[in-house]
Each structure stands twice: as C-alpha cells, then as structure tokens.
Image: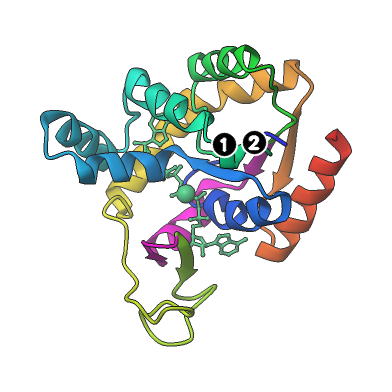
Amino acid sequence: ANIVLIGPPGSGKGTQSTRLTEHYKICQLSTGDLLRQAAHDQSSSEGQRIRKTMEAGGLVDDDIVLSLIDKNLNKPECRNGFLFDGFPRTINQGEKLEELLESKQKRLDAVLEYAIPDDLLKRRILGRLIHKPSGRTYHEEFNPPKESMKDDLTGEPLERRSDDTTETLNARLHTYHKQTTPLIEFYRQRNIHRSIDATNKVSNVYQQSLELIENFR
Ligand code: AP5
Ligand code: ZN
C-alpha cells in the first residue's frame, strides 16, 4: 500500500505513522525526519540552509526534498509500499510524486487528511517529547513517558524539537494553510482523499485510518 498523510503540525502524522507502518509492513517516509537528518549530517551550506528554513517554519526547496524522496523510493526492503508523512506539501510536489510512482508502475492508494483546528495544536506541539533514535513521540500531558524525560523502551533521554516554539509553530501553521491545503482539493479530484477528525484519541484516529485505508484497497 502507498498512503499519504496530510495534516497541520501536531495533528498526529508521526504518531499514527509508527502504528500504520507496522500494521502494513511498509516504510515510513517522513520528509521532516529526512531533512532533520540531512541538516544534521551536512555541515555544508546546504545543511545550514535547510536548518534555517525549518527554524523559520517555511518549506525547504523542492529539489532537495524530491531528491530525498527519489533516493528512498527504490529500497528493496520497502517493496510493500510507503507511508508518506508530511510529503507532498504542495501541488507541485503532488504532481512530482505522481510522476515518480507512475515511472515505477505504482500508485497511491489513499490520502488521509488529519483535520484539527489550529488552537488545539499549540498544547500538542509545546508538550511534545521525542526519542530521536527510534522516532517515538511522547507528550508531557497526553502521553507521558513512564519515567520523566526517558524513553519507555530504552531509558534513553527524550528531547524537544528546535522548531517546537510558539513562534515557529505559528509560521508552520501559516505555511500549511497557504501552501498545503490546496493539495487536498488536488486529491479530492482524484477520488483518493478522506478526512479524519484528528481531535480524537490516538487509538480512535488509528482505527479510523485503518478503516478508510481498507475501503480503498
Ligand atoms: P515535519 O517534521 O513534517 O513537521 P510538521 O508537519 O510540522 O508536523 P509535526 O511533526 O510537528 O507533527 P505531527 O503531525 O507529526 O504530530 P505528532 O504525531 O508528532 O516537518 C518539519 C519541517 O520540515 C517543516 O516545517 C518544513 O520546514 C520541512 N519539511 C518537511 N516536509 C517538507 C516538504 N515535503 N517540503 C518542504 N519542506 C518540508 O504529534 C504531536 C504531539 O501531539 C506529540 O507529542 C504526540 O504525542 C501528541 N499527539 C498526537 N496525536 C494525539 C492525539 N490524538 N491526542 C493527543 N495528543 C496527541
Ligand atoms: Zn511529524
């Protein structure tokens, strides 16, 4: 299966990705994670440019994002498909993904939109804690780790993301409404878009995601 998750910052894309990829035995492809990795690996000017854009809450250039996608689409261990988390984010990226998949005789099965009002996202983002090595996410209030600031499975320290500030969140939300929401119409026209109420509990959003994906398969 090839599935796209669209939703504003904090809507739960990463949280649901971990579960959905395990269920379908597919690979998670989070451009946010890949870009954070690229920014970290590259002390070069490109790495610095990526970091700056992410700190400002804008979108990183398409050529960088698309080359990361291209590199990952051919992994043999991902032949069951992909869960695209946070990609595409613009109509242009949506068109490019379509071309890339077509050239490999693949297609998207479902596009799930995690819909949630902006004012609920601040608490989610400002309370988020992450375990970098595994990608597991926690939340101070909504999903606290068993031991303060430690990953449940490894005991390793939890961290915050440097773009999880009120200021950068506002910019990320602005970018989402302006550049990403037009993509919803793009997929609606292709009859593969469904919207999910992402204000619900993690387990409810997961159940609904599974049901909708099954309806498309
Ligand atoms: P990215 O890393 O994708 O960030 P984002 O889109 O802002 O989304 P988040 O990761 O913040 O939120 P999420 O939906 O994954 O929520 P999560 O599950 O963690 O991108 C970062 C940056 O990279 C972008 O700003 C941009 O600069 C760049 N970039 C990325 N992709 C790009 C692209 N394609 N093109 C160009 N630039 C790109 O949950 C959040 C918190 O809420 C957690 O603490 C979690 O525990 C909690 N939570 C989750 N679900 C629930 C629930 N149902 N109830 C209560 N709490 C919940
Ligand atoms: Zn995420």
Residue pushed farthest front?
Answer: 76
Q: Is residue 6 visible?
A: no
Q: Amino acid at mark 2?
A: Arg
SS under mark 2:
loop
**Who is closer to the viewer here, 130 or 178?**
130
Position of the C terminus by quadrant: top right
Quadrant in the picture for residue 85:
top right
Give the class, few, some or many, for how many residues have Cα within 10 Å of label 1's Cα (few <14, many ≥20).
Answer: few
Residue placed under numbered mark 1 in the picture: 76
**Who is closer to the viewer here, 119 or 93?**
93
Position of the N terminus by quadrant: top right
Q: Tell me residue 115's x, y (percent).
A: 64, 43
Give the class, few, some or many, for how many residues have Cα within 10 Å of label 2's Cα (few <14, many ≥20).
Answer: few
Identified at 33% across, 39% down, the residue is 35
In the rendered image, residue 75 lying in the magenta stretch gets the answer no
Which numbered dot is residue 213?
Answer: none
How many marks are shown on the rendered structure?
2
Note whether 129 is above or below 83 in the view shown. Answer: below
Note whether 103 is above or below 142 in the view shown. Answer: above
SS under mark 1:
helix
Q: CA distance from mark 2 to mark 1?
A: 6 Å
Q: Amino acid at mark 1?
A: Pro
Image position of 100 (left or right of 169) = right
Q: Is residue 206 visible?
A: yes
Q: Are marks 2 and 1 in contact (CB under 8 Å)?
A: yes
Residue pushed farthest right?
Answer: 215
Identified at 19% across, 35% down, the residue is 47
Q: What span is in magenta?
A: 112-134
Image position of 77 (left or right of 24) = left
Identified at 42% across, 22% down, the residue is 66
Residue placed under numbered mark 2 in the picture: 79
